[in-house]
């Protein structure tokens, strides 16, 4: 009896020993804004999305063990780099995902390139990540400033909104968005009448709105984000901007912003996103799961969170195909080689410069009486196919492509 | 129509008026800070968080009990003021005899906790709060469109500011208060309950912050960080006006609102810096502030 038990034990050790030799252990770090202005756009919701992707992947691939960590970069590039360095050097992290705030994302892209790991940007907007600052270790997933400008700008100029005035957030992201949108407006025959650059986190926009009002421009483009966009829209309603015949164009608006504004204030707003929870059955099913685990009433998942889920999933597929996560550059090359396919963005691909391609949607916020259930915010005005939604490869100036 | 520095005069008048409106917000917020510092010698760093609590109280009253803006204008300051009284009784009164720095640290920590807890439950994106029906729309003044709500902000803020100034500087109650600040032991000896008076004063200062919060809810984003964004500016206003000077806080609030408004026209990028530049200059020339007494 004792002999048999010992033999079984030996066999078990042997069996598991050989199994673990084949097993790949992957650590994913969700570096995000957990406590400040982008915490509802990304934050805990993104962390959850990454965990969901890990769980889904491990169900089909028991030989890959995925662990997901989260970190709060506090919107500071130095804090973000410090966490990234620590994760890569001693934490055993192989891939960093999300990173809202373009300033922090550009820093993380650099750290990741030096350590030869993988960075998937789902939160940042700056199109420079796949332009002059592109890297063989970076994939830019969800959206970028060029795509926002192109989607919203073109649609509005074509429907008669041909004179523009910009309210621009005075930092890298706002400048990029204003520059990209101005180019689109002028290329389509429109005119930019003026702009005003406001500091980040401005409380009162009445002075700027008054300047926009006296410019007589048909469209007021909001090249800002988060609380600044919410305050601009709220106060524009107060100052009768829309009633006076001018229209607002939100250049970067998330579902959580609409939640904060409420439909009576936000109705009629037009903007571009690449994902919406109520888009199709697959996204609705995913959102149901997200809600069940997020356990926060009144929250809606954003496109950034969808990007974290899809990006993590595709990364894990590439690691499984290579059976190794050691060489970040090789993993990204594999990610570019394999076509992408996930329940949220459908089929797509990652281009040589690191740009993920998928369709974008021009949304309009519903009137309160059109909204049937909580979170029923948008109707689709137009679908922009993947090959038109993002900047053409040759225009980006990415050294990986030209040189 | 004539031009001033290339800006049409009409636009400039509009900006001046807007500056005054924003100034009335600053005045309302700095008033509470000035009262608390003047009477208690506490640098109330949780003022911004208490302002945010006022706005959240308004939201919660509307969402859960259906009580509208006008009820919130009365109830929110009472509820948040009561919270302030609890804070004073349980925490602040132990540190009056210590250096200012301890009060600052305690209230700052408190602000972080309040903000963190709120964010945990309501997220950071913000909550919707509709404008009350009666104050929608606006008047065309010829040189600008003045929303009715902004006119109401000026009227309400001026009324509250002047009433507070009057009570503290011109009534018997105010005289007791000021005397208690100078020499609490002596005033106590005259049979006046000084600790009680101090507690109520703190409660009143906090209620003022909550009142400003309710006023802000229909026009600014109601989010956990709404107070921390504003509080630094308001502190600068109080420092420029002279710590603890009621009239100084009110006048500086309006004045800086106008200066900030004009900066937004001529050099918008600097509009959130200009107040601190002025603060630095004022502190160099008059370290006690424009209306402060040297101690």
Image (cartoon, helix red, strand yellow):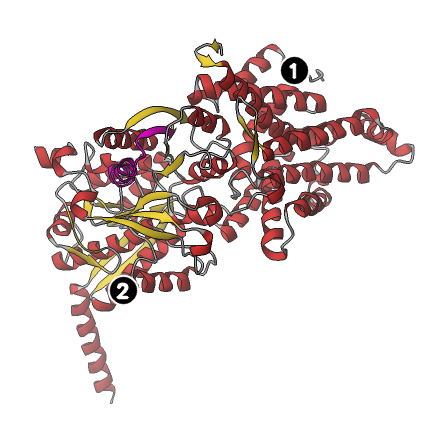
- Residue that badge 2 annotates: A56
**Does the stretch in magenta take in A162?**
yes
Q: Bounds of the magenta span?
A: A145-167
Residue at x-position 46% and y-position 52% = A368
Q: Is residue A35 visible?
A: no
Taking the image as drawn, is residue B6 in sight?
yes
Q: Position of residue B251 (x, y in %)?
A: 66, 20
Of residue B285 and residue B147, the one placed in the foreground of this image is B147
Relative to A318, say whether B277 is above or below: above
Q: Of helix, strand and loop, which one carries label 2?
A: helix
Chain on which label 2 sits: A
Left or right of A382 in this view: B193? right
The reply, left or right, for residue A186 in relation to residue A227 is left
**Label placed on residue B290:** 1
Q: Residue furthest right?
A: B190
Circle 1 Cα neighbour tier, 10 Å, few/some/many (<14 / 14–19 / ≥20): many
Q: Chain of mark 1?
A: B
**Which residue is found at the position 64% from the left and 27% from the top?**
B27
Q: Main secondary structure of the magenta part?
A: helix
Q: Which residue, as the protein is rendered here, is positioned at the far bottom? A: A1
Residue B102, percent from left and from top:
63, 34
User: What percent of the width, then of the height, locates residue B66?
Assistant: 62, 55
Q: CA distance from mark 2 to mark 1?
A: 64 Å
Q: Nearer the viewer, residue B84 or B109?
A: B84
């Amino acid at each position: 009896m004792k002999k048999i038990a010992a033999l079984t034990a030996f066999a078990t050790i042997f069996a598991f020993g050989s199994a673990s030799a084949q097993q790949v252990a992957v650590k994913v770090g969700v570096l995000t804004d957990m406590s400040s202005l982008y915490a509802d756009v990304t934050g805990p919701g993104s962390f959850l999305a990454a965990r969901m992707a890990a769980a889904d992947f491990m169900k089909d691939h028991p030989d890959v063990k995925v662990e997901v960590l989260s970190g709060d970069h506090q919107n500071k590039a130095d804090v973000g780099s410090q966490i990234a360095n620590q994760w890569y050097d001693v934490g055993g992290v192989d891939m960093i995902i999300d990173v809202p705030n373009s300033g922090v994302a550009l820093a993380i892209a650099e750290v990741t390139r030096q350590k030869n790991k993988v960075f998937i940007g789902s939160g940042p907007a700056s199109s420079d990540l796949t332009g002059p600052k592109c890297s063989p270790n970076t994939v830019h997933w969800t959206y970028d400033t060029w795509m926002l400008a192109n989607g919203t700008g073109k649609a509005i100029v074509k429907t008669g909104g041909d004179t523009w005035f910009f309210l621009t957030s005075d930092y890298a992201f706002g400048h990029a968005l204003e520059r990209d949108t101005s180019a689109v407006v002028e290329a389509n025959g429109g005119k930019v009448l003026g702009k005003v650059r406001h500091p980040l986190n401005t409380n009162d926009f009445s002075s700027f709105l008054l300047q926009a009002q006296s410019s007589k421009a048909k469209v007021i483009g909001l090249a800002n984000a988060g609380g600044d966009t919410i305050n601009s829209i709220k106060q524009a309603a107060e100052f009768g901007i829309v009633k006076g015949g001018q229209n607002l164009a939100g250049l970067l608006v998330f579902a959580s912003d609409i939640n904060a504004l409420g439909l009576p204030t936000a109705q009629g707003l037009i903007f571009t996103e690449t994902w919406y929870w109520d888009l199709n059955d697959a996204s609705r099913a995913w959102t149901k799961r997200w809600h069940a685990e997020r356990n926060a009433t009144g929250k809606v998942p954003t496109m950034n969170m969808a990007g974290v889920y899809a990006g993590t999933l595709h990364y894990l597929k590439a690691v499984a195909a290579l059976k190794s996560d050691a060489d970040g550059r090789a993993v990204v090359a594999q990610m570019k080689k394999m076509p992408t396919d996930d329940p949220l963005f459908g089929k797509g691909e990652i281009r040589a410069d690191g740009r993920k391609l998928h369709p974008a949607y021009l949304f309009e916020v519903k009137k309160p009486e059109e909204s049937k259930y909580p979170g029923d915010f948008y109707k689709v005005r137009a679908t922009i196919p993947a090959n038109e939604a993002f900047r053409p490869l040759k225009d980006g100036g990415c050294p990986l492509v030209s040189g | 129509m004539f031009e001033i520095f290339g800006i049409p005069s009409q636009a400039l008048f509009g900006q001046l008026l807007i500056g005054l409106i924003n100034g009335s917000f600053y005045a309302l917020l700095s008033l509470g800070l000035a009262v608390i510092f003047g009477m208690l010698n506490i640098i109330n760093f949780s003022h911004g968080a208490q302002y945010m609590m006022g706005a959240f109280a308004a939201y919660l009253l509307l969402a859960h009990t259906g009580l509208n803006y006008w009820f919130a204008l009365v109830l929110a300051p009472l509820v948040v003021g009561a919270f302030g009284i609890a804070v004073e009784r349980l925490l602040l009164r132990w540190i009056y005899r210590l250096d200012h720095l301890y009060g600052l640290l305690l209230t700052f920590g408190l602000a972080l906790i309040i903000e963190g807890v709120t964010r945990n439950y309501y997220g950071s994106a913000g909550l919707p709060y509709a404008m009350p029906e009666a104050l929608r729309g606006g008047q065309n003044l010829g040189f600008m469109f003045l929303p009715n709500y902004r006119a109401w902000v000026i009227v309400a803020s001026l009324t509250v500011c002047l009433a507070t100034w009057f009570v503290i500087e011109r009534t018997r109650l105010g005289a007791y208060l000021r005397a208690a600040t100078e020499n609490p032991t002596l005033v106590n000896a005259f049979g006046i309950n000084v600790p009680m008076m101090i507690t109520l004063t703190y409660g009143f200062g906090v209620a003022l912050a909550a009142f400003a919060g309710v006023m802000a809810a229909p026009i600014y984003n109601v989010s956990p960080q709404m107070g921390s964004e504003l509080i630094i500016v308001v502190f600068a206003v109080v420092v420029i006006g002279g710590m603890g000077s009621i009239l100084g806080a009110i006048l500086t609030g309006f004045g800086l609102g106008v200066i900030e408004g004009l900066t937004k026209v001529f050099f918008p990028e600097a509009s959130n810096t200009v107040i601190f530049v002025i603060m630095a200059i004022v502190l160099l020339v008059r370290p006690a502030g424009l209306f402060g007494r040297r101690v």
